[in-house]
């Protein structure tokens, strides 16, 4: 029987470096999805995954054994993604459109006409830019809800926010995205 996440974190807290690899195997895909949805760049998302687990390793001594590991890692990942986004924004780099294989492009576009594929890419780029117009909290809540499919209580726990704040942030994010994406309907 494999050790639980809590057992692995306990071992990590006690200095057992070998406990990090199973945690990474279990959670790296989810952390990557969150980071990619937030940052829209695969390379940046991979950096966030690495930074998340480095930070988890370094912070293992401060982890509360009463808390769940997945929301704790999610919170680290979201904070790392926000930091990466802010650093990139300060450097004023241009944002790249969504990769063609992202969930906003229909799965069968490879068979679609060039016009349909172009519209799909334009819509994906519009969604990417619309997401970037959200505040950090709104973007984090929206990404965790719609990309990682977390429920609102999980999001609140992961971000350390009251449930009401999560609900209002999601509501505002959805309305702002609708306003920004009216032309893509």
Image: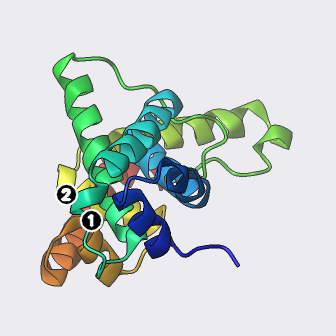
Horizontal side of 74 relative to 21 (left or right) equals: left
Horizontal side of 31 relative to 174 (left or right) equals: right
Residue 63 tag number: 1
- Distance between the alpha carbons at the discs numbered 1 and 2: 23 Å
Horizontal side of 44 relative to 176 (left or right) equals: right
Tell me, yes or no, if residue 142 can be seen here.
no
> Which of pointers 1 and 2 indicates the residue nearer the eye?
1
- The x, y position of residue 177, in whole percent, is 31, 56
Of the 4 image quadrants, the one containing the N terminus is: bottom right
For the point 64% across and 32% down, which residue is it? 118
- The x, y position of residue 72, in whole percent, is 32, 65
Quarter where residue 73 is shown: bottom left
Q: Is residue 40 above or below residue 12?
A: above
Residue 137 tag number: 2
For the point 52% across and 42% down, which residue is it? 124
Mark 1 in CB contact with mark 2 (< 8 angstroms): no
Residue 160 tag number: none
């Amino acid at each position: 029987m494999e050790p639980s996440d809590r057992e692995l974190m306990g071992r990590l807290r006690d200095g057992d470096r070998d406990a990090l690899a199973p945690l990474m195997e279990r959670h790296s895909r989810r952390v990557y999805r969150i980071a990619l949805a937030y940052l829209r760049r695969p390379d940046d998302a991979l950096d966030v995954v690495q930074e998340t687990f480095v930070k988890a390793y370094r912070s293992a001594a401060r982890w509360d054994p009463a808390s769940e590991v997945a929301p704790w890692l999610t919170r680290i990942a979201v904070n790392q993604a926000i930091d990466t986004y802010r650093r990139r924004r300060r450097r004023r780099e241009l944002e790249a459109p969504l990769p063609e294989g992202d969930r906003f492009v229909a799965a069968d576009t490879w068979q679609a006409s060039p016009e349909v594929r172009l519209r799909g890419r334009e819509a994906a780029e519009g969604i990417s830019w619309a997401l970037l117009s959200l505040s950090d909290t709104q973007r984090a809540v929206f990404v965790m809800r719609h990309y990682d499919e977390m429920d609102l209580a999980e999001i609140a726990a992961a971000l350390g926010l009251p449930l009401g704040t999560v609900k209002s942030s999601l509501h505002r994010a959805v309305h702002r995205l609708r306003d920004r994406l009216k032309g893509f309907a």
